[in-house]
Image (spheres, grey):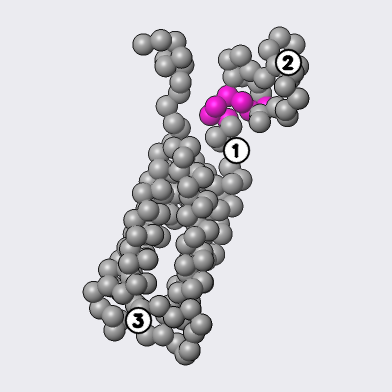
Amino acid sequence: MDSAQRDTPAPAPASGPTLFAGVLMLVNGVLSVLAGITGIAKDDVYARLGDYVYKFNLTTWGWVHLVLGVVVAVTGWGVLKGMDWARGAGVGLAAVSIVAQFLWLPYTPLWALVSIALGMFVIWALCADGSAADRSGAGASGKGGSGAGGPGGADRSGAAPGL
């Protein structure tokens, strides 16, 4: 094993708001899977309130929730494990989930509004947490091996420190 492989740190598990976002994604994904199964198995469980522009067959909605729920839950697990890919995917999936819940409003209005709010928190938590930069050693402290700028701390690339 060469020195580059030994110096590569393992992903740090999530903490703080990111931990909470990962748990929310995992739970919301499982609940979406259950809602999807319900929509697929029993078309008569959900009743639409009034006429709605975005009409879909409930079986179709069931499949949308099932697939989206599985992907969100897996990504939430990745966020909990500290995987860098999961942070970006989590932001994108939370945005898609917000749109899906908006379109799902006539079927479960209260839960859709709660899920939209949770999705917005997940986006904020995954975007605002700076622990990914801290894990890579490119933070403001300059403790990252060769670091930005080398001797004297001058950054010759023109980029701001930590980018």
Give the residue drawn at x 35%, y 81%.
Answer: 46
**Residue 128 vs residue 99: left or right?**
right
Residue count near mark 1 (Cα–Cα under 10 Å), binned few <14, some 14–19, many ≥20: few
Specify the label residue 130 is tagged with. Answer: 1
Closer to the chain start, of discs 3 and 1, is 3
> Looking at the figure, which quarter contains the C terminus?
top right
Q: Residue 144: in sight, yes or no?
A: yes
Work out whether 155 lies above or below 40. Answer: above
Magenta span: 134-140
- Mark 2 in CB contact with mark 1 (< 8 angstroms): no
Q: Given the current orientation, which residue lies at the most extreme bottom position?
A: 50
Secondary structure of the residue carrying numbered label 2: helix
Closer to the chain start, of discs 2 and 1, is 1
Specify the label residue 30 is tagged with. Answer: none
Residue count near mark 3 (Cα–Cα under 10 Å), binned few <14, some 14–19, many ≥20: some
Amino acid bearing label 3: Tyr
Give the residue drawn at x 46%, y 21%.
Answer: 8
Q: Is residue 139 magenta?
A: yes
Q: CA distance from mark 2 to mark 3?
A: 62 Å
Snapshot quadrant of residue 141: top right
Secondary structure of the residue carrying numbered label 1: loop
- Mark 3 in CB contact with mark 1 (< 8 angstroms): no
The residue carrying mark 2 is: 153
Amino acid bearing label 2: Gly
The residue carrying mark 3 is: 46
Q: Position of residue 22 (x, y in %)?
A: 44, 49
Amino acid bearing label 1: Gly
Q: Position of residue 144 (x, y in %)?
A: 59, 19
Give the residue drawn at x 49%, y 60%.
Answer: 96
Closer to the chain start, of discs 2 and 3, is 3
Work out whether 151 lies above or below 133. Answer: above
